[in-house]
Each structure stands twice: as C-alpha cells, then as structure tokens.
Amino acid sequence: MAAKGGRGVAELETEKSENGRKSENGRELMLGLYRMLVKCRMCDEKARILFRQGKYAGNFYSGVGQEAAEVGAAYSLREDDWIAPSHRDWTSNIIKGAPLNLCFAQLFGKVTSPDRGKSTPAHMGYPPIHTITPASSIAGQLAVGTGVAFGLKRLRRDTVVISFFGDGATSLGGFHEALNFAGVHRLPIIYVCQNNLWAESVPLRLQTALKDLSDRAKAYGFPGVSVDGNDVLAVYDAATKAIARARAGDGPTFIECKTYRWYGHSEIDPAKYRMKEEVDAWKKRDPVALFEKVLRDKKLLNDESKDKIAKEITQEINEAVEFAEQSPYPDASELAEHIWAQE
Ligand SMILES: Cc1ncc(C[n+]2csc(CCOP(=O)(O)OP(=O)(O)O)c2C)c(N)n1
Ligand SMILES: [Mg+2]
C-alpha cells in the first residue's frame, strides 16, 4: 500500500501518535483499544438481551465477533472525521464518542435519541460526532459516504470518511459506482469491508470468485489491502496508514477485514445455514480474547485491571439502559417533523 505518513503500531509503542484523535503513547493506546473492544462487546451483547426481553421493537444486527475490525478502523479518527456505517455498525457511534444514553435511547426508539425515535433501532447516526444514519438498502451508505468525502475535498478540509460495509455489499452496483467515483476524484475516504463470509444466508463463494476482496480496488486505481480482521493491531495499523494517505490528499484505500459474525444475520435469524464447526473455529479466534492475551503478555493487563474495566462499563451501560427506559416515546404530533428540509 502506498501509504504516506502512516505510523505503525511498533512506532506507536514508543512514540506519540500524530494521527490519533488523542495524543496517546503506546501503553495508553493499547489499553484504550482494549477498553473500546470490551465496551463494544458488552454494549452489543446487552442490546441482544434487551431485544430478546422484548424491551424494544424492530430488529438488531449484532456485530459480536467483528469488534477488532470496527474498533481498529475507527479508533484513531478525529472528532471532525466522518463515519458512514452499515446496519451492523451501531457500535461505530460508540467508538466515535456518542454517549451511551443516546445509543440505547436509539434502540428503544425514544424521543431522547438522536433522531427522536424515527428510525429503526440499529440505524443510528448522530450529526454532532459526524456519524451518518445508515441506509436500509445495502451499499446505500457507500454513495452517501462518498458524497460526503467529495464535499470535504471541495471544502479543502483535511477531514476523512470511513465507510463500513459487508462482503455482500461488494456485489451491488452502488458499491462499484461509489468506488469508481472516489478513485477518479481521489477522495479522502477509507472503504472498510468487514468480510464475515456471509451475506445473510449467502456464502462468500456464491458472492464472488475472488479470494481477497481488496483486489476489487485495483479496478478503481487505488490501493487495497486484506488484513486479519480479528487482530485489532493489524486493522489499526492498516487504518492509520490509510487515514494518513487520505488526509494528505492521496485518495482512497480499500481495507478488507477478514472476520466473522458470531450470531445470526439479525436477532430473528437462527443461522441454521452455517456449520457448527465453522462458528466454533471462529469463536476460538475471539478478537477480544486475542487482544487480552497480547496485553497480558506485555504485562499491561491483569485480572484486577480487567475486572475494573468491566465493572466501569457495566455501570455505564446500566445507567444508559435506565435512561432509555425512562425516556418517553415521541408524541404523535411530531410524526411529520424533521422529515423534509425547512425553508
Ligand atoms: C439492496 C438490498 N438487498 C437486500 C437487502 C436485505 N439485506 C439486508 S442486510 C443483507 C446482507 C448483507 O450482507 P453483507 O453486505 O455481507 O453485510 P453483513 O450483514 O454480513 O454485515 C441483506 C441481503 C437490503 N437491505 N438491501
Ligand atoms: Mg457479510
């Protein structure tokens, strides 16, 4: 990858990050990544439980198993950078800094959520932190994210966009149109494909004859890289290089994160089309547990500090769920508000 100004994880362990949203040294970065992995895992699992308890309607698309791809890609974004998430990226709002109160209010469809209870539970965007509400049509968010990147380039900002999507999205026309446009205009966008081997019940082998989805970038004239999507440092390394490249005006990068979703496509899908052996093998490569081992080996984490992190996050989640439960639903009189632009 022809990255400019990107900084590897090894350098970050000894030096200050220039590219990160915060200036973190190696130790803080490693622990920050770990805390965010755990936070995403715990929030996602809580969202699943709440759905199964009938606490909110609609549906939820769990990203459990894919946290390293999500966190590694988005963790170093600046406040003014953007994310165009898909249906499976509710936690990208958390990584970008959305208060958990708002994230759970979104699931519950309450008036205190960013869209005042208007969208479906997992379709969360929050303008103050520059996350865009996902499109319901697969690959739709690629056009929107690419359009935002075009606007940022015209404004001559050094701000970048990360667009998240799945393997299935790469078969749709909208994906190819967006990447072609971004290549032509050298837009400041990073396309992060979370290849979890399945698009609902369609396996990857019926989706494409390619081995590496990153090869698709060749057709549009920008670099593509495939990484172990369950290794948060590998994803972080690829993402910081791609972000630096986009910021420098050198154009897009495609990052394929090879990963796996542990559960069904959504909470109403028992996923009987997958072999148990396949699921079990991927669970053995749990991205959170893999990174925990790295930190333990480096003596950055022990039982005590691990428990402390989990307890702090549990308390934050409990408070957010209470906030969401106690918030009112929007009044019916609001139904037609915020739908059309005001003159
Ligand atoms: C254009 C379109 N076709 C079908 C659907 C129904 N649908 C929603 S998610 C999904 C699978 C998407 O697979 P992938 O892009 O691999 O993302 P993943 O769900 O695996 O994260 C499908 C078929 C849709 N929302 N939009
Ligand atoms: Mg998929």
Image (cartoon, helix red, strand yellow):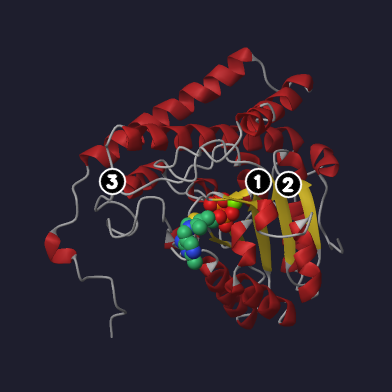
Query: Does any portion of residue 19 appear in the rendered image?
Result: no
The residue at the point 84 percent across, 62 percent down is 3
Q: Are marks 2 and 1 in contact (CB under 8 Å)?
A: yes
Which quadrant would residue 30 be assigned to in this image? top right
Residue projecting furthest to the bottom: 343
Three-letter amino acid code of the residue under disc 3: Ala
Which residue is at the front of the view, 321 or 174? Answer: 174
The residue at the point 29 percent across, 32 percent down is 53
Three-letter amino acid code of the residue under disc 1: Ala
Spatial CA distance of label 3 from label 2 is 33 Å
What kind of element bears circle 3? loop
Report the side of 47 relative to 326 (left or right).
right
Instruction: Check residue 69 in the rendering and tell me which mark sits there, or answer none.
Output: 1
The residue at the point 38 percent across, 31 percent down is 49
Instruction: Classify 224 as above or below 249.
Output: above
Whichever of callouts 3 and 2 sits on the residue coming sooner in the sequence is: 3
What kind of element bears circle 2? helix
Q: Residue 326 at what x, y percent from top left?
A: 21, 39
Q: Residue 343 at what x, y percent from top left?
A: 28, 86
Q: Are marks 1 and 3 in contact (CB under 8 Å)?
A: no
Report the side of 296 relative to 127 (left or right).
right
Query: Does any portion of residue 148 appear in the rendered image?
Result: yes
* Tally of marks: 3
Which quadrant would residue 6 be assigned to in this image? bottom right
